[in-house]
Amino acid sequence: MTPNSDGKVIRLNVPQLTTERRAELAKTAKTLGEDGKVAIRNIRKGSMDKIKKMKKAIGEDAVKDAEESLQKAVKKFEGEVGNAVEQRETEIMTL
């Protein structure tokens, strides 16, 4: 990219994306999506440990309910991350 200046405006000519570069960007989006899913799973693991430690205080039924609701939330957010990655890949490939 070479900047061009006409005195009032600076213009940058951005070259078109090549097919290879689009594939690289899509791969990067997938990698970031997987990193996000791993982070969600790590949070789930920590939360499950905390719920299990509270077993005596809240009871076994409450623990099972909390674990189920936590799992539903994790699945929901993993789905959202997957949808965002898929949408971004489609956007990158069609630009």
Image (spheres, rainbow, N blue to C red):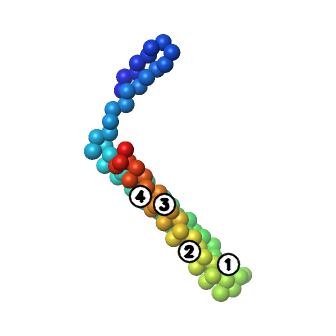
Mark on residue 86? 4
Q: Earlier in the sequence, mark 2 or mark 1?
A: 1
Q: Kindly identify the amino acid type of the residue bearing the numbered disc 3.
A: Val
| CA distance separating discs 3 and 4 | 9 Å
Q: Nearer the viewer, residue 29 or 50?
A: 29
Of tags 3 and 4, the one toward the viewer is 4
Q: Where 37 falls versus 26 (above or below)?
A: below
Q: Which residue is mark 2?
A: 72
Q: Which residue is mark 1?
A: 54
Q: Earlier in the sequence, mark 1 or mark 3?
A: 1
Q: Earlier in the sequence, mark 3 or mark 2?
A: 2
| CA distance separating discs 4 and 2 | 21 Å
| CA distance separating discs 1 and 3 | 30 Å
Horizontal and vertical percent position of residue 46 = 57, 68
Q: Nearer the viewer, residue 38 or 3?
A: 3
Mark on residue 74? none
**Secondary structure at numbered mark 1:** loop
